[in-house]
Amino acid sequence: MSNRENADVLIVGAGPAALFAIFQLGIYGFRCHLVDRLDRAGGQCAVLYPDKPIYDVPGFPETCGGALTELLMRQAAPCEPRFTLGRAAVELACEADGTWEVGLDDGTRLRAGGVILATGIGMFDIPPGGAVEAAELVPGPAAQWPLERSRGGIRVDPATFETARKGLFAIGDACDYPGKLKLILSGFHEAALATQQMRRHLSGGKRSSVEYSTTSRRVRQRLGRD
Ligand SMILES: Cc1cc2nc3c(=O)[nH]c(=O)nc-3n(C[C@H](O)[C@H](O)[C@H](O)COP(=O)(O)OP(=O)(O)OC[C@H]3O[C@@H](n4cnc5c(N)ncnc54)[C@H](O)[C@@H]3O)c2cc1C
């Protein structure tokens, strides 16, 4: 990564899939900028069911939405993500040079080499003190973006999680492919594969191998562990 001011990757949505993508990109030296319409990170887990027990995250016999979000944020922290919260992404465009531009609802325009749509079930509102059942889905602008869709999700290649547009990816509840499960663990898998392909995209098609913190000093340094 060349410039610490500009992000390499823009992520729309800051739910669990997006938070894990920060870490996956960060260990390879890429920096992310996340935008979420909500005033906090964590998506459905943090807002719709922060205290409900979750039993199906591998390695955690029991956790809950709030605790999982906190751990994902801690895991992502060494990768120095930037967050713009309380703002919706309303426009998405690919520029002539292949970079992507995302327009926010306050007129801000953000540019990056690649975009990950981690928009989940879309934008939602929950009245203060309201219950999960009171949550209302707000038809988000992402639904209008000209992307191929299947079963309401953004159609992706399940090997790379790239859409039909180069440099544009979709992960988590936002994407669809044969066998898609709307679960947190699926979002983590999708983030891992999407970020490998994003890495290739950002390095001009160069193939790179997986690096483990056990064997890669560079990875340990990026995580502040060496
Ligand atoms: C009550 C309930 C219980 C659940 N229990 C479990 C469980 O036990 N185990 C399990 O695995 N899964 C469970 N799930 C499902 C799980 O929460 C989802 O699969 C997971 O949250 C999807 O994560 P995500 O990152 O894809 O998206 P989300 O968590 O949906 O996050 C997407 C984010 O994108 C933002 N966004 C959308 N559009 C825009 C835009 N245009 N601009 C800016 N921001 C935008 C939204 O504000 C949101 O914060 C449950 C879901 C619910 C509702």
Image (tube, rainbow, N blue to C red):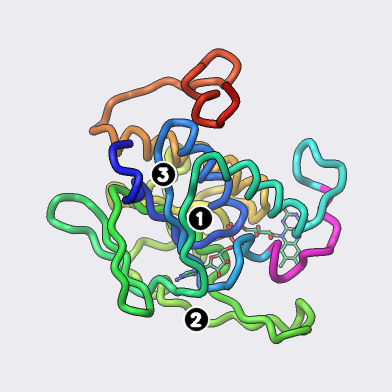
Quadrant for ligand 1 reads bottom right
Choose mark 1 or mark 3, whichever is in front.
Answer: 3
Residue 151 position within the rendered picture, expressed as x and y whole percent measured from the top left: 51, 64
Residue 34 position within the rendered picture, expressed as x and y whole percent measured from the top left: 46, 58
Q: Residues within 10 Å of mark 1 (few under 14, many from 20)?
A: many
Secondary element at image label 1: strand
> Does 2 sit above or below residue 162?
above
Residue 54 in the magenta stretch? The answer is: yes
Residue at 62% over, 64% down? 43
Q: Amino acid at mark 2?
A: Pro
Residue positioned most to the left: 96
Secondary element at image label 2: loop
In the drawing, what numbered circle is on residue 139? 2
Choose mark 2 or mark 3, whichever is in front.
Answer: 3
Residue at 75% over, 59% down? 66
> Does 39 sit above or below residue 2?
below
Query: Residue 120 lies in what quarter of the image?
Result: bottom right
Q: Amino acid at mark 3?
A: Arg
Label 3 belongs to which residue?
31
> Does 35 sit above or below residue 189?
below
Dot 2 or dot 1, earlier in sequence: 2
Q: CA distance from mark 2 to mark 3?
A: 29 Å
Residue 17 in the magenta stretch? The answer is: no
Label 1 belongs to which residue?
176
Residue at 49% over, 32% down? 27
Q: Amino acid at mark 1?
A: Asp
Q: What span is in magenta?
A: 45-55
